[in-house]
Image (tube, rainbow, N blue to C red):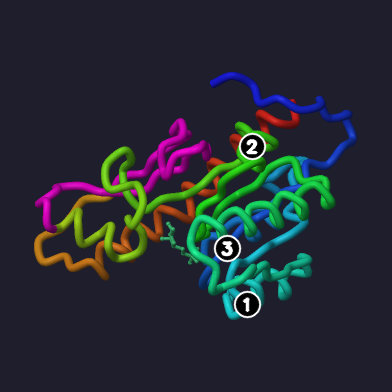
Amino acid sequence: MSKPGGPALQAQDILKILVLVSGNGTNLQALIDAEKAGRFGRGRISLVISDREDAYALTRARNAGIRSLAETPGPKLPGPERREALSGRILAQARAEGAGLIILAGFLSILQGDILEAYRNRIINIHPSLLPKYGGKGMYGERVHKAVLAAGEKESGCTVHLVDEGTDTGPILLQRRVPVLEGDDSESLAVRIHNEEHQAIVEAAVMMIERLTH
Ligand code: GRF
């Protein structure tokens, strides 16, 4: 992959990381723990934004002393307009914060518009399947695992990829695989994959921090 654009960091500079969340935030927690454990070098999670006010992920951020806020523009707006408004607000927050990396950690909204260009090669997403299989619009949550089981797949897993204009289509950074076991239902498969996600998102974050600070 080509090196991301943007100004080179000075030796003492910190790479500020913006994490986007929608739910429980166990992936966010894995990132917080990794930073605490000293794995992030000059990377610092400096802001967490949720597209839902009641996301427990916001509590996790607060507990870790990380600034956090909810951006929930016009919940009644039609999909494309809501996406546009949300993406614009997130871009404004990212710029104001001076964020150099954006991590989508269980973020259910789709980003579109200027943020994709402004943060080209600096936005990563985690998806609970082995992309390009079982990705795209409507493929989230238990729907992914149900589709995997219905197709009789022998393995599944998770993927961390760079975000581009498509849904789950950007260049893949890494994948972790799990077996699909006899008797699995979407819940048991989801739990197995979720555990791998926590490692995958940290590995990918470390990889991106390296790329962006060296
Ligand atoms: C994960 O399975 C992620 O892949 C998906 O949403 C889930 C988020 O989990 N997009 P959490 O909020 O990080 O616990």
Of 166 and 80, nearer the camera is 80
Residue ID at (27%, 62%): 143
Is residue 189 left or right of 47 when viewed as pictured?
A: left
Say few, some or many: other residues with alpha carbon within 10 Å of mark 2 (under 14 / 14 to 19 / 20 or more). Answer: many
Q: Secondary structure at mark 1?
A: loop
Q: Earlier in the sequence, mark 1 or mark 2?
A: 1
Q: Is residue 46 above or below residue 76?
A: above
As measured in the structure, the alpha-carbon distance from the residue carrying label 2 to the one carrying label 3 is 16 Å
Determine which quarter of the picture holds residue 60.
bottom right
Q: Which mark is residue 53?
A: 1
Range shown magenta: 150-177
Determine which quarter of the picture holds residue 169.
top left
Residue ID at (74%, 44%): 43
Q: Is residue 13 above or below residue 61?
A: above
Say few, some or many: other residues with alpha carbon within 10 Å of mark 3 (under 14 / 14 to 19 / 20 or more). Answer: many
* Of marks 1 and 2, the one in the foreground: 1
Q: Is the residue at mark 3 in contact range of ligand 1, meaning its CB lies under 8 Å from it?
A: yes
Quadrant containing the N terminus in the rendered view: top right
Residue 153 is a magenta residue: yes
Q: Is residue 214 above or below residue 17?
A: above
Q: Secondary structure at mark 2?
A: loop
Residue ID at (52%, 40%): 163
Q: Amino acid at mark 1?
A: Glu
Q: Which mark is residue 192?
A: none
Pointer 2 residue: 122
Q: Are marks 2 and 3 in contact (CB under 8 Å)?
A: no
